[in-house]
Amino acid sequence: MKSSKEIRNQFIEFFADKGHKIVSSASLIPRDDPTLLFTNAGMNQFKDIFLGKGKRAYTRAVNSQKCLRAGGKHNDLEEVGKDDFHHTFFEMLGNWSFGDYYKAEAIKWAWELLTEIWQFPKEKLFATVHNNDDESFQIWKKMINISKENILKFGDKDNFWEMAKTGPCGHCSEIHYDRGKQHCQKSGDENHKCVINGNCGRFVEIWNLVFIQFNRLESGKLIDLPSKNVDTGAGFERLVAILQNKSSNYETDLFMPIIKQIEKLSKTKFETNISTFRVISDHIRTLTFAIADGVLPSNEGRGYVIRRILRRAARFGRLLNLEKSFLNKLVDIVVDILGESYSEIIEKKEHIKLTIEQEEKRFNKTLDKGISKFDEIAENLKPCDIISGKDVFKLYDTFGFPMDLTKIMAEEMDLKIDEKGFEIEMAEQKKRSKSSAKFDMNTKNVQWNEFFQTDKTEFIGYEKNKCQTYISKYSRDKKNNIKLVLCKTPFYAESGGQIADVGEIFNENCKIKIQDVQKDNDLFIHFGKLISGKINNKEMTAKIDVKRRKEILRNHTATHLLHSALRKVVGTHLHQKGSYVSADRLRFDFTHFKQLTKSELNKVEKIVNEKILENLQVNTSYDDLENARKRGAMALFGGKYDKQVRLIEIADFSLELCGGIHCKNTGEIGIFKILSESSIAAGVRRIEALTGEFAYKVFKKNEAILHEIEVQLNCPSNDIKNKIEKLISENKDLKKELEKFELSKIKNSIDKFLANSVSIQSVEIIAGKVNVNDAQQLRESADYLKSKMKNGIGILGAEIDEKASLICVVSSNLQNRFHAGKIVNEAAKIVSGKGGGKADMAMAGGKNAKNLSKIFLPKNLNKIFSQMLKK
């Protein structure tokens, strides 16, 4: 039996031998594509080529692409567990032609691999083509050794492929495999007939050959692409199942080790609850890869989807009596199975485990509340009643209950759920998720005035601060706001967390102040203001603000030092999650699950400043992405990089992938000062810091504050600590004395209340208003009153924070007749409040403090206690 690793390698090597470039899988986070939440097909990373907006150094490619379908148009989340083949995370084997070969080669090579290398029986293979694609039909019929009866035509639903509502698309030819009658899931239906695309389980699609020749516009119109392309996709898990002669994807070596571990943890056999095992084993793969690519559980966008998947897996775990966090214990198995092909899950393994563990622990607390909420909903229903779609969605959205699990719980109580109502609520949520993924480039609908055409701006800012250049095109509004593209520029465009340069572009005829620069693919869009003159096509001088640039590069190089220092002090599980590098400060976001201690921050700051004092050389080089990773280069967590990457190396202390601008030596930073460390999201911390002149200003400011303290305390700086400690101690002593004095006054008041107590039907009533600072003092007052009472009921009131506070105490011999909670609740009505508590002592509050004194009027006391005595 072939292993999954062998099958993957055979596919890639087969096409590599036919001149295809082996391309690494793209991240699950789509690069510069606002139409997708997640990478859901192998062609996503090549979309710019199909649209004619990008190029590669090759025209043929092959890879195994990690894909996630749990959001947007392609969403298989709710289907996972119900059958043998649906997954949220899967691998897509694919080969591509970018204006090179077309239908004949694609079909011929697919048939060759299937029948000659993998030995699929030819009579069990079926080919489908689009009704309007006679070219593909003729290729199958005349060039391929396949029975004519096994070539079938279908319409758009089955043989027209498109990635999203807009974008590249085209006819496709699918290859299906006949698994045999024993796999038909509708065999009990005498009217059923097994057919291709019949969805009965017998015939399964194993390879889709897509011929991308159109681009669908937002209007729905199809237009021809600049060149004809091939995009094929073979579902890896399904292929492995067939080649390993398994009836289900979940029985292959891609899933069974995970399932075995779940069996071990739950002490439950796979066969006893197949759907639950399927859900958990699928979802842990999704979580492992999504978190490795930088997605963290959150309440919006991609993070929202991942949080739902994690919670769904955890909730299914409850069906196996796995009530404590367990998902993190499955990550090692996933890494063992797939780490050789996807090294990022090895590198991020500890972070993945920590993220899942922390999130699952938080959810387990929420889950118990969710079960209580379900019980609360079900309590008011009778058998055969329907739980509303709104309630089902609330359980899903607030407590992480997947609809199918709510359905299971409902069925256990002979209830039904409103699935249609849930879908309506879900559709609204999808709109919210989709909106978080939208990206709008503010140059999209610009009307350009073009001097000459250019496809790429040459950036020379790594070496130069100014240059002679020409304006390629520009746009100007009525307020003289300018957008322009230069043929070459020294201005850095905002990216990688580093802000853009500012400066001037000028010649003898005009002057433009540049305020921002953004990238639009290979073009640098300069945003600014026309200061004088008229824009022209003559040679221009482009000059950046050098002082500001130096301030920015100090902060940028400092973030690299900070990153390495953090990993040395806190641990190598820590990874960069983002950064913001400006002229006046830096911000560095990183993955970690608890607050850094003062000691840790001091160590980090000390290490960074030591490296600055060493004046280490900062070197720039270029390398292949894979080689850079092998050398240990750190990267932005979840970042997307080209095949060829730029490296910033600081001696043997730091090596990072980075396209930003840096100091030549660390000594140029001057000094580094951490301002704050805080949490910005679950599992993500943030450090804000200063360098150079801005850090120096902070030290001078602190020095001035210290001097002022010296003056105020009349002591030298080295004696300030002792002086403050002495003052604090003296203040505490004075505060205690004051509290004793205040308590003495309160006790005197209570003694007066005792002396003036009234008797209502032989029960001593002690009541009055006391002057206290807080609820604690009110309780202490009540304790004193209770200790003095032998046969009575006491009620005290106070005004605290502009509100009325009440407390009632009942002596022990009366507690069988009177309840302090009921008495204080009755009294609280006079101050527009309520309360309650135990029989011996209870408290209440009210918003109408002005009426507090009315409680203690004889007529009101008589009314309150008379009612209690009657009861």
Image: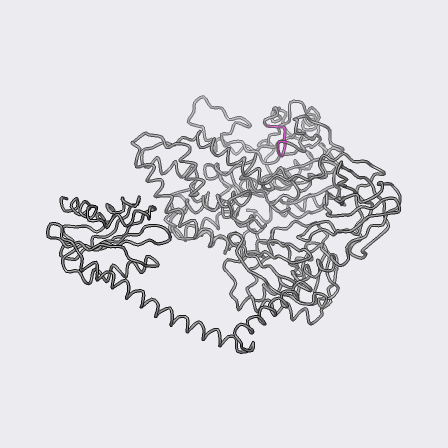
Residue 521 x %, y %: 73, 43
Whether residue 163 appears in magenta in the rendering, the answer is yes
Give the side of residue 192 with respect to residue 521, left or right. Answer: left
Where is residue 745? Give x, y as percent: 28, 64
Q: Quadrant of the rendered structure where residue 798 is?
A: bottom left
Instruction: Return the x and y of residue 75 as percentages of the image width and height.
Output: 53, 36
Is 316 or 441 nearer to us in this picture?
Answer: 441
Number of callouts in the render?
A: 0
Left or right of residue 312: residue 541: right
The residue nearer to you, when weighing 865 against 275, is 865
Residue range in magenta is: 158-165
Residue 778 drawn above or below residue 504: below
Q: Quadrant of the C terminus?
A: top left
Q: Residue at x 66, y 26 (%)?
A: 219
Q: How is the image coloured?
A: one colour
Q: Quadrant of residue 673?
A: bottom right
Q: Is residue 844 magenta?
A: no
